[in-house]
Amino acid sequence: DEEGEDPRPPLTLTELRDGIEGDYRRKYLWTGDIDPALYDRDCVFTDPTLSFKGLRTFQKNLANLRPVIDFFVKEYDVELYTCALDEPNSEVRAEWRMVGTLELPWRPRVDLRGNTRFTYAPDKNNRIVDYYECWEDSAGQVLLNLLKPGGA
């Protein structure tokens, strides 16, 4: 229900970590294919370019972006380096790399390393309440790299 308690059964911490790993296997950084069962409906999503609240908003944003990504990015991959549970801080932390080539005449390349902190709330059935993504390069540098042939 919209305002009441979450009717979904609680996640174990193993299910949560394994679910996040599954999102990376599905290359969600490119595809947007997350498992919504892992997230609280009021989760806050933050990356270097924007921040907003709500799982539905996240899903709507991805649905709007997906046709653009499908059109411009044909070759892509996501490498997951680590995905570790940090129980004392109620977090799962992931380190990753996303690479891809854009279908533009100069074939710019995205090669981005980053990390994501997924904060979960035990009182919200271990659902993710805060998604915080950081990149090794600034958002401006990532955009500048898209102007270079082959991302060089």
Image (cartoon, rainbow, N blue to C red):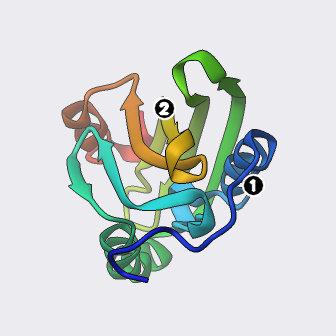
Identify residue type, mark 2: Arg
- The quadrant in which the C terminus is found is top left
Closest to the observer, 93 or 68: 93
Quarter in which the N terminus is drawn: bottom left
Image spot of residue 70 (x, y percent): 49, 77
Q: Mark 2 or mark 1, which has the lower sequence index?
A: 1
The residue wearing badge 1 is 22
Say if 109 sits above or below 32 in the image: above
Q: Residue at x 68, y 57 (%)?
A: 10
Q: Is residue 52 left or right of residue 16?
A: left
Q: Is residue 9 above or below residue 70?
A: above
Nearer-the-camera pick, 73 or 133: 133
For the residue marked with disc 1, what is the amino acid?
Gly
Residue 117, disc? 2
> Is 1 placed above or below 9 here?
below
* Secondary element at tag 2: strand
Dividing the picture into quadrants, the one containing residue 102 is bottom left
Give the crowd class for mark 2: few <14, some 14-19, many >=20 residues within 10 Å: many
Q: Is residue 93 visible?
A: yes
The reply to whether dot 2 and dot 1 touch (C-beta < 8 Å) is: no
